[in-house]
Amino acid sequence: MKKLLTITAIIEAATGVGLLVAPAALAQLLLGGSLDTPAALTVARVGGTALLAIGVACWLSRENGRALVAAMLLYNVVVVGLLIHAALALALSGLGLWPTIALHLAFAFWCMVCLGSKRVGMPVNDL
């Protein structure tokens, strides 16, 4: 669980900073689209702030983060659904879209594995 939260912290925080600093470049890389309006840029930066906060929460919860891993499972499953919808229904196709889907799918699986394991000293119903 510690390794999952550490890697998640680094990736989500880096993505958050990327969205804060260069939201248009990240949108182009991920979705193959642009952020044409000030509103879109603002929403992307708010999303970047949220990802940065997720990264910090994961980093700070590395020692005992069972509840956070459950929340991250929900996050990763919903992100996979949204990005697949973007690819298939909205015809968005950035270079990083399918690798990002695969990454979040892998993280969702890893979260499930961590939540399914019973470690000594960790309450089973600590969710």
Image (cartoon, rainbow, N blue to C red):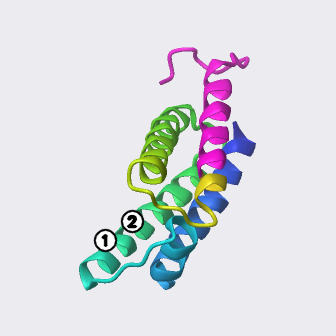
Q: Secondary structure at mark 2?
A: helix
Q: Residue at x 69, y 52 (%)?
A: 6
Disc 2 versus disc 1: distance between alpha carbons? 6 Å
**Would residue 71 be counted in the magenta stretch?**
no
Q: Is residue 2 above or below residue 111?
A: below
Indicate the quadrant containing the N terminus: top left, top right, bottom left or bottom right: top right
Q: Which residue is mark 2?
A: 47
Question: Along the horizontal axis of the image, is 31 left or right of 36?
Answer: right
Number of numbered labels in the structure image: 2
Towards the viewer: 24 or 118 = 24
Q: Is residue 89 above or below residue 94?
A: above
Residue stretch rendered in magenta on the structure: 101-127
Callout 1: few (<14), some (14-19), or many (20+) C-alpha neighbours within 10 Å?
Answer: some
The mark found on residue 118 in the picture is none
* Residue 9 coordinates in the image, percent (x, y): 62, 56
* Residue 82 coordinates in the image, percent (x, y): 42, 47
Towards the viewer: 32 or 63 = 32
Looking at the rendering, which quadrant does residue 4 occupy? Answer: top right
* Residue 99 coordinates in the image, percent (x, y): 67, 54
Q: Which residue is mark 1?
A: 43
Towards the viewer: 50 or 2 = 50
Name the kind of residue labelled 2 in the image: Gly
CB-based contact (under 8 Å), mark 2 and mark 1: yes
